[in-house]
Image (tube, rainbow, N blue to C red):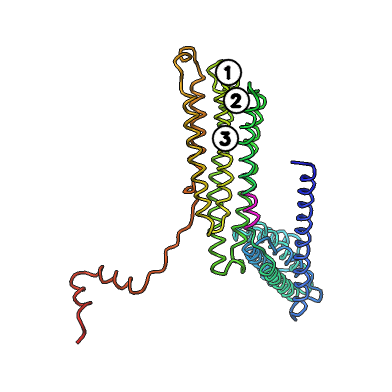
Amino acid sequence: MTLDAIRKFRSALAVKSTRATAAYITRLTATATFAYLLALLIPAGTSRPVLAPLTALLVLQASTYQTIRSGVKKVLSVTVGVLVAVGVSEFIGFSWWLLALLIAGALLIGRMLRLGDDLLEVPISAMLIFSSVGMHAAATGRVVDTLAGTAAGLIGGLAFAPLRVQPAREAFCGLAQRLAELLDRMAADLVADPDPDPAVVAEWLSQSRSLRGDIERVDDALRTAADSAKLNPRALVAADSVQVTDMTVSLRGGLETLEHAALTVRGLARSVLDAAAIDSSASPVRDACTRKRLADVLTQLGEVIRTYGRLLQADPACIESVESELAAQLAQTHRLQDALAELLEPRADVLPSAGTEWPLRGEILVHVDRLRTGLTASSIPRPRRQPRPDPRTRAARRRRAAPPRDRGRLSRPSS
């Protein structure tokens, strides 16, 4: 990558980050302001309902589903705390030991309700109401402000929550590209170095291990995409909902395939590293022709992984053409693998003196074969939806399934 390309890439990342930050700040500011104005319109609220925008900021989450769940838990925690304080104050006056019991009881109730991160809202609400002078007015105002802030947060979530499927697709494509680049580097090093350096091969192993972090980031992006589609108005349209669900399922299956491929590449790098440490003619990486054919297989597998990544992002109209391209590349990989297997077969002239070298030849072939067979189009899960049966078809099925004595009654004309 040239210096100009690196600068353009960094500039694009900076612009993208700035836009995301501006959108985030605008979303929170607009929602909080709307919550305050909404609370002012409610007569039972407080004169300065700052609790409403505070609740809206706490409720508003990255996805509509998370916003609704957070809003329900927030209202429940505040309401429970207010009811506990009002109920206790009806029978006993304020004192420090009663305040301690109130806090302990509120925490216990919140734990029983499994409020999670909103657990502390219960004792906080209970303490504020229990220690206030106008208890009933304060209780009503706190509940009203909380409801107004929650309502504003829900409206803001419905209005601003985006679908995050595209970032998940980009993350998956980036993982496939990095895995393919690793295979390309392994192939280039095999061809360029007549005597493979174990230190260079160890870098392959280190880079293959670092892919674990990329896999976890793609997994988080897929989870975020699935959450963003739940109860999102943009995904509730029938066609969009089906498309988002299918894309999420396909990307999840594709991520599992690439995760297995990354583990296989790690095993292949380990086998080549062990072979490079053997100072013998039986070592598979000491022969230039064997290295060349192994490099050809790895280069072809890199192209297969790139095509596999494009297949998971292809439009329905282009899927068949990409699948045909992937099948042709896999067939070519199979031919290259067969040519590599001929060179890795044991030779009679060196077999008696061979030790652990020959199992390494088999390991290399096994890893290559596992990579090739795991990247087929059939490994991608595609949801199949059964079409709704025609009413006449269902009636015919009921007639065929009826007992013999009922069949005559079903087909007998009425008098």
Q: Which residue is mark 2?
A: 273
Q: Quadrant of residue 15?
A: bottom right
- Amino acid carrying label 1: it is Ile
Counting residues from the start of the chain, the first of labels 2 and 1 encountered is 2
Counting residues from the start of the chain, the first of labels 3 and 1 encountered is 1
Q: Residues within 10 Å of mark 2 (few under 14, many from 20)?
A: many
Specify the quadrant that holds the N terminus: top right
3 or 1: mark nearer the eye: 3
Q: Which residue is mark 3?
A: 298
Mark drawn on residue 278: 1
Numbered range of the magenta stretch? 165-172
Instruction: Tell whether label 2 touches label 3 (CB within 8 Å).
Output: no
Q: Is residue 283 above or below residue 315?
A: above
Is residue 168 a member of the stretch shown in magenta?
yes
- Amino acid carrying label 2: it is Leu
Instruction: Tell whether label 1 touches label 2 (CB within 8 Å).
Output: no
Residue 140 placed where, x, y %?
Answer: 72, 75
Residue occupying image coordinates x 49% and y 15%: 354
Residue 51 visible at all? no
Counting residues from the start of the chain, the first of labels 3 and 2 encountered is 2
Residue 44 visible at all? yes
Residue 180 placed where, x, y %?
Answer: 61, 40
